[in-house]
Image: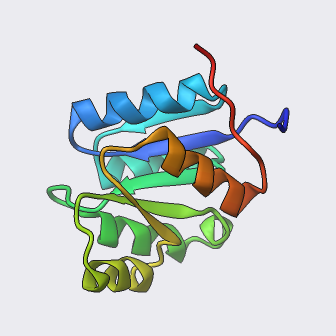
Amino acid sequence: MSNVKFNILIVDDQPVNLKVAERIIIATGHHPEICGSGAEALELLRSKRYDLVLLDCLMPDMNGYQTAQRIRLRAENDRIPVIALSSLVSDGHWDECIKAGMDDVLAKPLQPESLRKLFKKFFKVDLSWSA
């Protein structure tokens, strides 16, 4: 296991989804920050460095696809993994996420095992959980 602690931005307009994801991230010893909109996420990304963005696709005002496209417009955000959090599972949805600049898709609600696989894929580290 790595001693590196990652800063993870979680973006979702549903408070219960934010709380579930936040608790899972905290249990791994990493540092979550939550926000409820794409506009708020863009503001946070201007002022702080994140190692990973977990992004709900279906939000009002600015959806996850639009948010991902705007994240990718800034050069300093080009290498941050942006992961869709979605209840949609079709191939067409996956293609839309990739076209918008997202790197992967995780099913909602977020599950510890899917997060573990994600960390292994993007950061080459295994996660452990505290009780």
Q: Residue at x 53, y 72 (%)?
A: 103
Image x and y of residue 90, in percent: 25, 78
Residue at the far top: name it: 131
Of 88 and 14, the residue lying toward us: 88
Q: Is residue 6 above or below residue 65?
A: above
Marks counted in the figure total 0
> Residue 7, percent across and down?
64, 39
Does 54 appear above or below 16?
Answer: below
Q: Residue at x 47, y 78 (%)?
A: 101
Q: Quadrant of residue 126?
A: top right
Q: Which of the two residues, 74 or 63, is positioned nearer the viewer here?
A: 63
Q: Is residue 31 above or below residue 68?
A: above
Colour mode? rainbow
On-image quarter of the N terminus = top right
Residue at coordinates 63% horizontally, 18% vertically from top-left? 130
- The C terminus - image quarter: top right
Q: Is residue 17 above or below residue 28?
A: below
Q: In the depicted view, which residue is nearer to us: 42 or 94?
A: 94
Residue at the spot x=61%, y=30% of the render? Answer: 31
| Quadrant assignment, res 61 | bottom left
Nearer to me, 54 or 42: 54
Q: Is residue 32 left or right of residue 128?
A: left
